[in-house]
Image: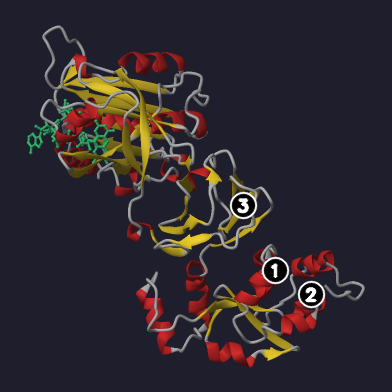
Amino acid sequence: QVPLKPGRSLMDWIRLTKSGKDLTGLKGRLIEVTEDELSKHNKKEDCWICIRGFVYNVTPYMEYHPGGEDELMKAAGTDGTDLFDQVHRWVNYESMLKECLVGRMAVKPIAAPKEISSAVSEDKKQLNGVLPEKKVLASSAKDLGPSYDWFQTDSLVTIVIYTKQKDMNAELVIVDCQDKRLRGEIIIDDHSYLVEVDLDHAVSEDVAGNFCLLQHLLEIILSKKDNIHWKMLGQPREGHNTFVKRTDRGLFYRKCKLVSKTEVTHDTRLFCLMLPKGTHLHVPTGQHVYLKQIIAGTEVVKPYTPVLPFLPLDFQEPPRHNGVHIYLMIKIYSRGLFTQALDHLQIGDYIFVSNPEGNFKKSQVQTSEDLILLAGGTGFTPMVKLLNFALTEVSCLRTVKLISFNKTEDDILWRNQLEQLALKDERFEVQFILSQPTKDWVGKQGKISSSLLSELVKRSRKDSKVLICICGPSPFTEQGVQYLKDLGYSQEEIHAFTA
Ligand code: FAD
Ligand code: NAD
């Protein structure tokens, strides 16, 4: 530490960074920096430093650096990561030097990691790392994906992920900490950022409660089992610190315990699975997970869509919808490979559950005035959370209509709850249509058809904004979508849930 000149305190530095002054000299542009380019900026009056692949113009920071200018100059024009780690491990340089960010080090063609966009990477290679201005802006946001850092005290290890995203929420973060293995995945649009390491030492696995999201900053706080100083966070695993397309990231499974199994109908059950203590996972509305079981020595995987434990009538969070349990409504087929094995699980047995997937976006509902849900059999499952979300959180919604198609009366899922909900909320209406009714059935019958849909699917007003969601057996969904299009509904007004 060296004495700093008056007006050069940390607070003064923060003020300067917030002043809107161009601290990089690049007018807000982010560029790719080659080693050659970096080495040219090695003077006090023009000093760039690379830390963990990111290049900062630290020239304006010189006089504010608590360690003094000479210390900073040791890394001038070079990769200062090691030097930085020795002295400043605990310093939040990412936010401190945010306004000094020049860009990222250019990827050397031989050691090129998985590229996010091949078109952009071609350009980069041709231009030897310096991108033309207009392309820099388009590509830099993705290229400069999230990053992380870690800090420790005697008893805690804190991993900070700089998501660089403003609209973060708990559904976009999945954390697993089991057996000294830490895995944190952040979903940003259709990309995924991963931190995955074998931790240096043992920690208490209860991370779920020690998870903190502050705007674009995510903190995962781990409690050390022994109060010893960690030399490193841990050994990186494959995919650690990468930002790739979500679809390029392999599915990750954790072992969940079956805690209850209740009857819904004669062949359908509500399975309640408990996430491990070290897992934070919320399945977003409209998304599914994959279950994995070893059946006859082979890994078998099938998709299922989590529901709520029941349809809340007061539109508040159901008591056990607390991020610890996952509820699945599953039909057991007498000759079904997976569902038979599932049905044979005992309370206390374990099953593997993946990260969520699916292309439904809540924003599709958020602007709707009329929501129509067409469900065939267990195609009802995505409608459960959707219904609750729409009635609870979508203020512009005027009508919600569920049309539930089943074979017989005995196959209707949560009939009583749906009828209760319709009584309670005047925006909601439910209709049951049976394809194999008994002669006592006085309601509608048949399968999905153009005439049925033209009669039942209607806008509440001539030009009202409508969203129609459909899910069920593939022929049901495919025919339904076609009939709706024939009736004049546009692609944007229809969402089909498929695999
Ligand atoms: P399988 O062994 O695949 O067979 C199922 C039944 O169909 C058996 O009775 C079998 O004899 C019969 N069958 C199979 N193939 C044919 C055929 N070609 N012709 C005639 N009969 C045939 N299901 C739910 O219950 N709840 C959910 O929440 C849920 N969510 C899903 C989400 C998605 C995105 C998708 C794609 C499917 C979802 N499913 C859901 C269905 C689930 O994934 C399984 O397909 C289902 O559980 C059957 O699996 P199984 O291995 O037991 O049956
Ligand atoms: P089911 O056999 O009991 O049929 C329910 C209703 O669907 C029938 O009464 C009928 O009205 C309609 N239907 C069935 N076959 C049809 C056909 N060939 N043509 C037109 N309409 C038909 O349904 P189930 O056994 O509960 O199966 C539900 C299906 O939903 C499964 O195939 C499952 O994979 C699918 N599903 C998909 C998702 C998803 O997100 N993609 C989620 C849950 C369920």
Q: Nearer the viewer, residue 275 or 246?
A: 275
Mark positioned earlier in the residue sequence (3 or 1): 1
Q: Identify the secondary structure beneath mark 3.
A: strand
With respect to residue 330, does 112 lie above or below? below
Q: Look at the numbered discs 2 and 1 and tell me whether their residues touch, using CB distance below 8 Å.
A: yes
342 relative position to 458: left or right: left
Task: Name the mark on residue 67.
Answer: 2
Image quarter for ligand 1 equals top left
- Quadrant where the image shows the N terminus: bottom right
* Residue 460 percent across, percent down from the top left: 39, 30
Quadrant in which residue 125 is drawn: bottom left
Residue corresponding to mark 1: 88
Q: Between marks 2 and 3, how big is the CA–CA gap?
A: 25 Å
With respect to residue 122, does 163 lie above or below? above
Q: Is mark 1 within 8 Å of ligand 1?
A: no
Asked whether residue 30 is in view, the answer is: no
Q: Look at the numbered discs 2 and 3 and tell me whether their residues touch, using CB distance below 8 Å.
A: no
Residue depicted at x 53% and y 62%:
146
233 relative position to 307: left or right: right
Residue depicted at x 90% and y 72%:
7
* Residue 90 percent across, percent down from the top left: 69, 62
Quadrant in which residue 419 is drawn: top left
With respect to residue 235, does 266 lie above or below? above
At label 1, counting other C-alpha atoms closer than 10 Å, the crowd grade (few under 14, some 14-19, many 20 or more) is few
Disc 1 marks which amino acid?
A: His
Task: Name the mark on residue 157.
Answer: 3
With respect to residue 171, does 327 lie above or below? above
